Image: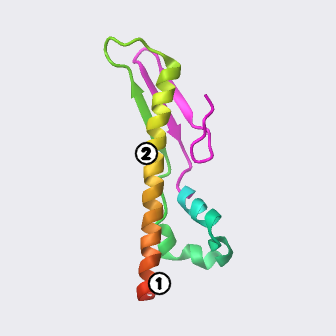
Amino acid sequence: MCKKVGGRVPRFNVDKEKGVVVAYLDNCMFDAIDTICGRTELGCLGADFFEDASIRTALMMNSYRGKAKLHPGDVFNEEKGKEIALKKLQEKYNASKRKAIKRFLSRWSHILLNGCE
């Protein structure tokens, strides 16, 4: 399984004895900013722009995880566990990225309508 999340391949921790699979994704803090800059011309604004407090509204947590746990009576299947853990990881990561981008857009909308404070 080598499905990417945020452009990176997550790592997995498999504990067969406990029936747990955890998917991890690290170094995510700037992913929303990278998305914003990749889809707009913001990258050409220079370092001063990125020192502004408004860009910090788009920071994400640095790491995310998704966990799949075996239910009593089920048979452990590592691939199915990875699939479930990956799906949970993707959901958490994507929700966080959407929120970060919305915070950034809300802040810039405020600045455009009201000027700098």
Q: Residues within 10 Å of mark 1 (few under 14, many from 20)?
A: few
- Disc 1: which residue: 112
Above or below — where is 6 with respect to 2? below
Who's the residue at 62% across and 43% down the image? 8
Residue 81 x, y percent position in the rendering = 47, 24
Residue count near mark 2 (Cα–Cα under 10 Å), binned few <14, some 14–19, many ≥20: some
The secondary structure type at the circle numbered 1 is helix
Spatial CA span between label 2 and label 1: 30 Å
**The N terminus lies in which quarter of the figure?**
top right
What residue range appears in magenta?
1-30
Is most of the magenta stretch helix, strand or loop? loop
Question: Which amino acid lies under the numbered mark 2 shown in the image of this protein?
Answer: Lys
| Residue at 55% from the left image edge and 75% from the top image edge | 51
Which residue sits at x=58%, y=48%? 6
Q: Residue at x 45, y 87 (%)?
A: 116
Q: Name the quadrant containing residue 41.
A: bottom right
Q: Amino acid at mark 1?
A: Leu
Quadrant of the drawing holding the C terminus:
bottom left
Work out whether 8 lies above or below 22: below
The residue furthest left is 72
Most foreground residue, 95 or 51: 95
| Residue 113 image point, x, y percent | 42, 85
Q: Disc 2 marks which residue?
A: 92
* Residue 110 place in picture, x, y as percent: 41, 80
Q: Earlier in the sequence, mark 2 or mark 1?
A: 2
Residue 37 location, quadrant: bottom right
Q: Quadrant of residue 39?
A: bottom right
Badge 2 element: helix
Look at the image and say whether residue 2 sits in the magenta stretch. yes
Residue 11 to residue 6: above or below: above
